[in-house]
Image (cartoon, rainbow, N blue to C red):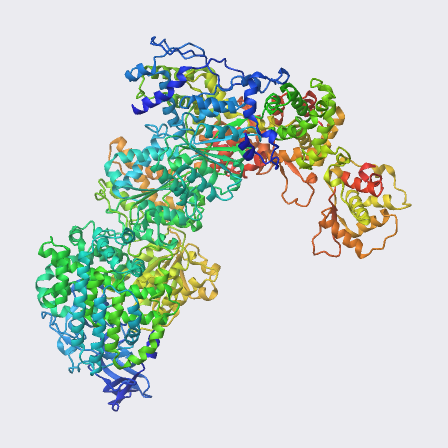
Amino acid sequence: MGVLTCAAAITYKPLQRVFFRQPIRGDLQSKAEVVISDSAELPRKSRHFHHNTFRFFHTIMSKRKAKDAHLPIGECINQVHQILRKRFCHQQLPDKPEGLEAQHKHLVELLKRTAVHGESNSVLIVGPRGAGKTMLLRSVLRDLSEETEVQKNLLQVHLNGLLQTDDRIALKEITRQLHLENVVGDRVFGSFAENLGFLLDALKKGDRSSSRPVLFVLDEFDLFAHHKNQTLLYNLFDVSQSAQAPLAVVGLTCRLDVLELLEKRVKSRFSHRQIHLLSTLTFSHYLDRVRAQLSLPDGFPDGKFVEEWNAAVTTLCEDKSVVEVLQRHYNSSKDFRSLHMLLMLCLSRVSVAKPAITPADLLDASRLCVADAKANMLHGLSILELCLIIAMKHLNDVYEGEPFNLQMVHNEFKKFLQRKSSSLYNFEQPVIMKAFEHLQQLELIRPADSSSAKTQREYQLMRLMLDHGQIMEALQKYPQCPTDIKQWAMSAFA
Amino acid sequence: MKYFTRLRVKRIYEWRGDPLGFNRKLKTLEYGSLAIRVEGLPQTTIIKTGQHILIEGDDNDNPYVARVVRLFADESGEQMKAVVQWFVRVSEVPPSKLKLLGRDPHPQEIFFYEGRNCDDEVDAESILRPVQVKHLDTAAPFPESEDKETLYVKLSWDSRNFRDVDSSLVESAPPRPPNPSLPPSPPRCPPAATPASRGPGRRALPTPDPAVMRRAALGDVRYSRGTASAGKATTEAESLHSVTKLSSSKCLSAKRRNATERTPGVRKKLQLCSPDETAVLREDVLNRLLEEELESAGAQAQRLASSPPRSPILTHSLTPLRRTNRNLSSDHSIHLNPSAISCRNQSLSEADSPPSPAGDDSSSPQPGEELEAHLLNGAAETPRRRRRETPRGNYATRKETRTTTPSRRKEAQPGKEPVLAVLAEEENEGSPTLPVAATRSSKRKSALMVSSRIKKQLNLLDVQEDLNSDDDDEFIPSKKELQSSSEEEEEDEDVEEEEEEENGPGSDDEVVAKKSRRSSSSAGSRTPRSKQKTCSSARTPRKTPRKTTPSTPRTPRHATPSIPSRSQPARRPANVLEEARTRLHVSSVPESLPCREQEFQDIYSFVESKIMDGTGGCMYISGVPGTGKTATVHEVMRCLQHAADVEEIPAFRFCEINGMKMTDPHQAYVQILQELTGQKATADHAAALLEKRFSNPAPRKETTVLLVDELDLLWTRKQNVMYNLFDWPTRRHARLVVLTIANTMDLPERIMINRVASRLNRIAQHSSALLRQVAALSGDARRCLDICRRATEICEHSAADLSAAGLVGMSHVMEALNEMFSSAYITAIKCASTQEQLFLRAVIAEFRRLGLEEATFQQVFVQHQALCRVEGLQPVSVSEGLAVCQRLGACRLLLLEPSRLGVLQRVRLNVSQDDVLFALKAD
Amino acid sequence: MHQSAENETCAPAKSYPRKVVFSICAHIQQREMSPPEPVFVTPAGGGSEQSWMAGLLEHPGYDEERLRRVSEQLSCREVQAGLLLSLMGQPQQYCYPSLFIYGHRASGKSHVVNVFMKDLELPHVTVSCVECVSVALLFEKVLRSFFGCDAASLLPRSPSLSDFVRIYRQQSSQSPAKQTRYIVMEKAELLRDADVNLLPALLRLQELVKDNVSVILLSEIVWDKFRPNTGCFEPLLLHFPDYSKGELQQILSTDRHPSYSAEFYSSYINILLGVFYPVCRDLRELRHLAALNFSKFCEPVAAGKVKEMDTHKLWKNIEPHLKKAMQTVYLREVSSLQWEQMEEHESGALRGLSAHTHVELPYYSKFLLIAAYLASYNPARTDKRFFLKHHGKIRKTNFLKKNEKTSNHLLGPKPFPLDRLLAVFYSVVDSRVAPTASIFSQISSLVTLQLLTLVSHDDQLDTPKYKCAVSLDFISAISRTVNFDIVKYLYDFL
């Protein structure tokens, strides 16, 4: 309730006046026209969410009382954002892992055996980025923690290859998380050697039946393989293979070749269990997932709103253009994260003025996602810089990809000017040079070899880091691009 | 170290009288008796045949006990030899065996040694002095008498079991009482000297209680007089001391009583050293008493605490037992034995073979409740200390038995001496609520703790030396002085303990105080000389560590590394499958190693032979991982240990290090030293100590078997570590067998100097197929076990589905195999998104076009676009293309150049083209 | 806009004249009453269309008054600002873990973000990666501005990522974020050169520290060039397009001189853009130039020679001046100060502005330089033809055939041995010169002046090789001073 009221209070002001605006071409944020009557004790009209439909709300006051019934629209939107953002931005765990049931079961079994029977284990969870490795692990741990026997016994140590960049740091972190006795506050005493010895003693001291099992989670596992001698890995695996304190080592990585990173002796100590998260989900599943991701839970305060919202989502997912867009995204990547990004962009458009996701939003969002960044940048170049790039393109065509220097480019440009310099006049060499350097700053061109320190700048060899497609695309989009330049770019020969 | 001490006391050995006869066969002159005197001193000690003597060994506080059988010299007469009949001290009996005794050994008890395997011929020079040995029949309790020189023989020990001995073997012509003015054995004299010098230094230090010091000083004075008068008044002097001590302890306890508030800072620091509340309370009260100096000392204590005391120090000096024994053995033993035993066999079980699940303290109730019963006396220390020791194998267990011994004394004492009365009283008010029995055992506990504390203190000092000892000269004596002190004056000890108990670290001053007195008493007339030594030993590191301590925080030595124990014990395997799985777990060591018989034989015979004829040697064992190298060696060791226990071969000591378990090759020294002696030292110092240990002769030294796993990790550019490892065994007196293990067959050739390589003979283990179809994939036994384990799981699951108790069939194994060994790449490609698959296609197409295995992204992208058009997909933008490409790169289907090269980055396949095509064709 | 000026670009090192600096604040009031002339409204970047919806930025959860103030400062960036705001969502809601905003320099990236952060009073820290030479600085800055100095003081001496995350965690657990915390990283491209783990860790910081924090990266390099080799958490990409000409016009014409009418000033801007727009679109540069040249522009008006309306005369007056500016002050060849001085005394100063045209050299050094130039740009085989009185029959035809591919003025100078240099030197210098030590010393001094570069290794003392490192116009200027017609002797120009 506390949340609700305060949120309501916040949304109150915007409700006062919402502006009308025609959706503007090029304006990504297509706003809707809405009138809000403050003294609106009028009943709510049937909400079918579409642009510029007039809508009337109850005042906040009236809604505060009838809580579960229907909240003010602002309040609902607020909730929607709250919930969906948690999903998209915060990787909130789903209730059950979709598509990963088998792996989930396997991992649960494994860890349970460690926690309950004190059987040591080691396993790698391998899958591409955003395939839900961490999600899987977290949901497994959540499920396990519901069992008191496990939850009371299992000690957890979480390491991340990004953070613990060498064994020294890693050991300190482990000691800290295990609360071994050489820790005071969060200060770990002792040299590297001592810490290692200390940890090993501690583990050796333990035994299968009596001491609490320890779960080691190594995120970005492959990075640990780069530590000196792989000491940490060796010892963890070694303990997990000998009758000491029961240990479960769970590594997460996106590298399929992770085992090849391990030294022979380390590899031999690793039980070659790998859980692969390679999603074989079809497009229909993908659609379902989108729907699931967008639709609101039943716990939502305003039942009516939920119905409408979810209905809207379903209709959205059936929309032809939407399906096309999604298909395209599905083709390029199936993982959660990129999907979340897309949906996040859509969600960001949902406002009081437009309390639903429209196909247009999705199209815009996907346009944002698939837009070619380089083309965007080219759009902002000055006409001179663009000409230089075209000249380079021609040089690339003529000397099939050989590196070029400023002189050649300038020469090309001059030739173009001589042939038909209707729109442009020649520039001084230094001006060209400046443009050239700007291009280099933008990393659109880069020196072919760094060794050319002694050569003058205008003779330094460069390579163009653009695809012809990009250049052409940019030209089409380029604001009021002189036609002769277009033709020059099109012309097959320089 | 010995030659060093010799320098200090020149002892002269000479035959008394003419040779009794000449043994033609042996070309030896037989003598009746031998005279030992120290130059500058009138008195001489006479050693006759049949007399019991102390013979100096590597452990200076309890020299070996033996009985002279005959004295002889070679015809030239300069080589003086003695044939002796050995006796073993309690500490020399393998603790595992001690329990055959059925009772706690008396610290002054010795056993008539019937073992074969040690030469009974010793250098006459190694004889220290005569000692009094009494024979008691088995039933008889140990008598109590003031002098602790006397040793008692009840049983004989043939290193298999104890037997009764008839007195005729032991008793001999009643040896004359030890001459008090006999200059103490070489190991003792330097302590005698140094402490005197310590006197002034000591006063400089803040002392726990001025009263103590004053009285002590007083004691000094009186004492020196006592000694001046032909110094036969030892006992009297001692009683004096006890008085002073008593008073000191009194006022200390008084202080303790009214000291209530504590300083958080200190508190924190101490909590880290001893988590349990009461201990903290006590300690920091004391910290308030003794100033910051003590804190630093405390830091040292923390450093040292986890290192067990050096080998049998002072235990045998705790003589008051004698007095107490009678009543003790009758009633208190009931309390005693269970705990003593329990801790023993527990430590045993932990000491030997890993697999046996040892009952930890927490699991076994009895120590547990003791623990909380006697927290106040810091008894909590003991279980923890015990736990701490156990990994160090039989060594630890040996000190178990010791830590229990002093306890009896404590219990008996209240009756005996005012000191202990004080102790008792103080104890009781410490824990007023406790029932009588509790208090009793509490005393025992406290005693345990006390003695342990003392030990701690003692090597607190000597390891201080370790920490900063570039010069061993300083290091050795100061150690000895402590030991000697602890040996001689038990009353002092009682009180000292009394103090130690509360002022943990600080009390080393006390120890020194004792030292000084001790010195004046023993070193009698030699004080002037000791004065000179003052200067040298005044600079002894006792202060230096003080400086060093606060510098870098080190691991608190006595913090126990331990994983908290689980709330309820782990579930036992329920069904047959789970059982099987536990069996199949790699950790469970099989009772026999199949297919390793040959290697087993080789190693076994090698080590056995070396142990048998007390020589050294080293062996290099190589083989690919998981072929059971380490397992085999452990197996061998288990068998040998067994053999040693049943006395087929002489006892030996096994210690193990692993190259991967240390942060730097030179740590090897530290770890070895710690395993052998339990003392911590810096790498260099450890190296020095080991060097000494292995190069110096010592009679009846037992063979050490050293297992060095992952040898290749010990490689350094100068190869000194490896070189030493292979060089020590070749020393004459080393008696060291080194077994080295590594994966690489040609390690010696590759990285060892020829000299090193030549030193070892090697076995190469070749992976033999344990399970055929696994062997096909890899000879790794671990792998195979894992596979089987996985198979059982699969079977279990499937069984669960079919609700039929399934047997693990070939199908399951194959399934497991597939799981583990099927390349993820193909599935990955199959599961890749359409664009990713297209991109892979494009890559291959481009490779084909170029006829190279490499192309730039730009080139591939062109192909990709084309393919998109063919597939009727709308072409992707370059950014998307890059994203796809780099996603493939992230999971290493592709190998890419850094992404900042953009479209120019070169692309390679990390999979064979055929695999890609196969995977793509499949769907 | 000012602070964006500081940390957005490295363009003019000099601080702007006072006049420039009252930028936006001044123009806001103007804008409504003075819409830019339709001629500048460009089809593509509907800047002017959006201009009227300034101040209409709105989002629930933020104080409306503040929002209005904000949106007033964000002229011509309403779209991006709106999108960004909607992505950020309400303060207490989760924001996407990491945003990546890219766009050309001076396209208002940091400006928009910082205005949001400051005026909406969101908990944030703005870090310029240029300043953070070591990660320690970064960590310290972040911790300090989120949790205060004592938190920052917890960092060890050379903190690792692990330390940072640990401390952040414990701090945020003590004071959990009520609002989303933002870490704004400017010039993010420099992160690529920092520790490899830093960028990936920052991108998933929210997950690592379990706090409602989101990292905003600003850069002018596209994201494609950021991705680490093993991938990472993909940020949400956001493009800030360049200002269209209309928008530039509109913004620039806001910092008009109070004593002149808006029309007058905007016509000036119009002319200015006419000259510079093809070359440069950097708002800051343009504003700089505008400020520098305005006084010159209104000279005739002040003198009363021309009317304010008489745009053509004004143009005639200013145009050459601006052209000159492009070759000098735009290239930073003269500082703004010098430039303004030059305007005072109109005479000679204007000639030969480019710095390298007046280098004083000793007589023989000039010839040595000329000789060097000839030696390095002429093929050795042609020396005979150029420098021998009566060379044998060299047939023009095969002699003159040369394609530009081999033209040295495109490929750059070739190295030549010392004796060839001397040979050419003796033949070009008219009087007879003895090969004295002075000659050789002059050669070495030319090298130290970096007019020649020594290409051969130092070990070959007998035959040192040199390259001429001066451009054609420089050498021709030199040869003019000794009236030597170098072009006659250049192979490329035959």
Q: Identify which residue is drawn at 59% across, 17% down.
A: C34
On the image, the x and y values in percent for residue C219 come to: 54, 33
Q: Which residue lies furthest to the bottom in this view?
A: B18
Left or right, B142 with reference to A231: left
The image shows residue A489, relative to residue B22, as above or below, that is above
Query: Which quarter of the rendering shows the N terminus of chain B?
Result: bottom left
Q: Which residue lies furthest to the right in this view?
A: C390
Residue C181 lies left or right of residue B476; in this view the side is right
**In this picture, residue C250 sits left or right of residue A164:** right
Q: Where's residue C288, x and y in %?
A: 63, 30
Quadrant of residue A214 within the rendered picture: top left
- Against A52, residue B130 (above or below) is below
- Quarter assignment of residue C329: top right
Q: Looking at the image, is A21 positioned above or below residue B263?
A: above
Residue toward you, B123 or B464: B464
Give how far across and how far down residue B278 sits, in percent. Answer: 20, 52
Q: Can residue B453 be seen in this view?
A: yes
Q: Nearer the viewer, residue B32 or C416?
A: C416
Count how many numbered circles sit on residues in the image: 0
Residue shown at 49% from the left, 23% from the top:
C71
Q: At which x and y percent is residue B471?
A: 38, 70
Report whether residue B779 is seen.
Answer: no
Instruction: Decide: is B822 above or below B554.
Output: above
Q: A302 or A363, which is in the foreground?
A: A302
A236 and B369: which one is in front?
Answer: B369
